[in-house]
Amino acid sequence: MKIPDFIQAGDKVAIVAPASFIRGNIDEAVNILENWGLKVQLGQSVGSTHHQFAGDDSLRAQDLQDALDNPEIKAIFAARGGYGSVRIIDRIDFTKFQKTPKWIIGFSDITVLHSHVQQLYKIPTIHGQMPKSFADGTSESLETLKAALFGHKIDFNYIQKSFVNRSGLGEGVLTGGNLAILQSIIGSQSDVDYAGKILFIEDVGEQYYNIDRMLWTLKRANKLAALNGLIVGGFTSMKDSAPSFGQSVEEIVMDKVMEYNYPVAFAYPAGHIDDNHALMMGRKVQLVTTKTKVKLNYID
């Protein structure tokens, strides 16, 4: 594993849009990054539209490629998620990035990039707030993102009483992201080997039965049996069917992993929520859970 250099005040960072186009603007996010002491370069895709995308596939791929290859750029923010990263991932040449890695930041649809980079190049990335979500993000979520980028501690402890965790201790490389995206890349070259990993999952706007179906897909693809731990983040704006599916997200998850022995943490503050704390994908972590307490420590 080769960890990218942490950024410093005065560094230049890029914002590109590898997926859906940006509604409104990201001026507030640019101001925040500049207040962190960073110089911000906006890619052409940030102001582009092509149907639902931030420019056509060629433009978005070239924009990401330019940011990856530019030695002046020390970190790359995906402006937003939506849909589209999978359409361009196989066009990207990571040769220069592999030699001189830099931080890639985003969540949701950007799970494609996290998984692809982790599986093929073993380089950590940051699952965290994107410029389009900065305006709604809590100060705590933005502080964790800043801490991750600047190389400060982002170990996190919390207490939750929404659903009983499964107690235990597990260590492994942190992987995962958006559940729908993880399911969609199974069998591709972007698909991470989950064995021995700590898996994080989150999602938004899905039917309960579809969460059940996606987790069954992971289970039947032998993705869940050999984990060293599972972290369940935000599952927001869930939709029920008529008649009701009859289970909560937490119950759906526990049904799929009941026969395994690794720790399971619920209500981790990450995902499609305002309090979206940064996670460093591809780094080794220790997960410790009791029924109500969770500790996540970075140990590499």
Image: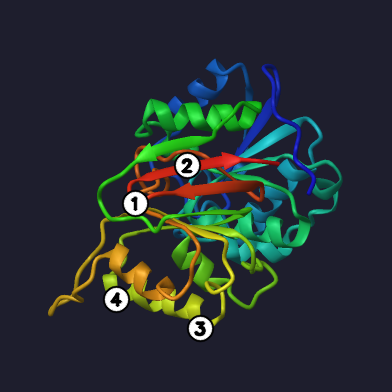
Mark 2 or mark 1, whichever is nearer to me: 1
Q: CA distance from mark 3 to mark 4?
A: 16 Å
Residue 268 visible in the picture: yes
Q: Can you tell which quarter of the image residue 89 is in?
A: bottom right
- Quadrant location of the C terminus? top right
The reply to whether the C-beta atoms of the residues labelled 2 and 3 are less than 8 Å apart is no
Q: Which residue is mark 2?
A: 295
Outermost bottom residue: 220
Coloration mode: rainbow
Residue at image x 35%, y 49%?
267
Q: CA distance from mark 4 to mark 1?
A: 26 Å
Q: Is residue 279 above or below residue 139?
A: below
Which label number is shown at residue 209? 4
User: Which of the two discs, 3 and 4, labels the residue nearer the N terminus?
Assistant: 4
Mark 3 or mark 1, whichever is nearer to me: 1
Mark 2 or mark 3, whichever is nearer to me: 2
The percent coordinates of residue 20 (x first, y second) are 48, 54
Q: CA distance from mark 2 to mark 1?
A: 12 Å
